[in-house]
Amino acid sequence: MLTSLSLIFLVGLAMGAICQKIKLPRIIGMLVTGIVSGPYVLDFLDPSILSISADLRKMALIIILLKAGLSLDLKDLKKVGRPAVLMAFLPASFELAGYVLLAPVILGITRTEAAVMGAVLAAVSPAVVVPRMVQLMEQKYGTGKGIPQMILAGASCDDIYVIVLFTTFLGMAQGGTANIGDFMNIPVSILLGILLGSMFGYGIYLFFENAYANKHCVRNSMKVIIVLGYSFLLIAIEGWLEGKVAVSGLLAVVSMACVLKRKSDAFVSRRLSEKFGKLWLSAEVMLFVLVGAAVDIRYTMDAGAAALIMILVALVFRACGVLLSVAKTNLTWKERMFCVIAYLPKATVQAAIGSVPLAAGLPCGKIVLSVAVMAIVITAPIGAFGMDHTYQKLLTKG
């Protein structure tokens, strides 16, 4: 395991640095490291690492979501309330509709199978989008109109919406039926996630304040460990309640960090944000190398031109959803184009659920996985590259 960890960190960092040197996003080098060293190419990674890969990826995602929550000003979010809500479901709905309408024609699958495929592919990748939106907030690009805050909020809820739809459509493909209760899980999951996270955030704030009032010094490093511990607990609670009550653990983590920022002294929240930013340096490598390791590149070879056409056409549908979400706002066309680019990347969700239809024995399982793998390989680098190289041209500073 230690050999694998050293390979993940050292080779992942080196490949990231090489990509950065040639003006490409670091994540491309990390994804390539994972694909090449993973079980489907050279098979250098220890099975014990791969067996806990999903948990390690989630831990890394928690770190950047905490950083995001501690950087997010709720006052700025209020400026973009309506488009932020629409961005949480409209682009995904449009992309899903694209698959349902056209995948039967292009890929020769049934409507229900197309819905399963669309639900797998419709989620944006918070792992690619969130770090870049945090960077934009820190550099004050687009913050005057709340653009990074809007994209960050939308991307945080987008996954919840899509995963609920995926579970519903997967059941239908296996012979089940959909009912209104399945779709009610979407708002319930969001609201309970925000409520639970806010309660935890306020509780942690009171604990820190009481410790300070009683002259017990809690170092910022210790605060990071405490916040991380409660974040893992929130994710665990989501698992405990699965099948009983829908709760979004990841949204609860963001909410907890937001409340902690709002209630705490500005210096404390800034120091915590800086420390989670430093943790993200290692978590980013772990996350994207393991996402790459989960990609079976052989399925990309099998997918063919039809899969590529389907992905590109569905992204056009998605772009229409983004543009409709920001319609009747004061955003310029350049700023709207940036929103479209920011909503392109796919990675974490597709790596997590892309193989589920195949494991469930669905006839469409192989083609769904093939398209999911191709989508990760194409959209994650393009989306990251697009954001990194256009934000200074498309967004206004200040």
Image (cartoon, grey):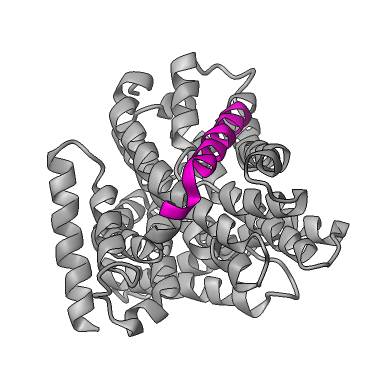
Q: Quadrant of the N terminus?
A: bottom left
Q: Is residue 22 above or below residue 243?
A: above
The residue under the point 30% across, 65% down is: 286
Q: Quadrant of the C terminus?
A: top left
Residue 358 in percent (x, y) is at 59, 68
Which quarter of the figure has residue 363? bottom right
| Residue 43 visible in image | yes
Depth check, front residue: 335 or 104: 104
Residue 195 in percent (x, y) is at 65, 60
* Magenta region: 301-322
Q: Is residue 383 above or below residue 375?
A: above
Residue 126 in percent (x, y) is at 46, 50
Q: Is residue 313 above or below residue 334?
A: below
Q: Is residue 49 above or below residue 149?
A: below
**Residue 229 located left or right of residue 203:** left
The residue under the point 69% across, 39% down is: 105
**Residue 139 located left or right of residue 119:** left
Is 287 colored magenta in this rendering? Answer: no
The residue under the point 31% across, 51% down is: 270
Depth check, front residue: 319 or 281: 319
| Residue 262 visible in image | no
The residue under the point 80% across, 61% down is: 182
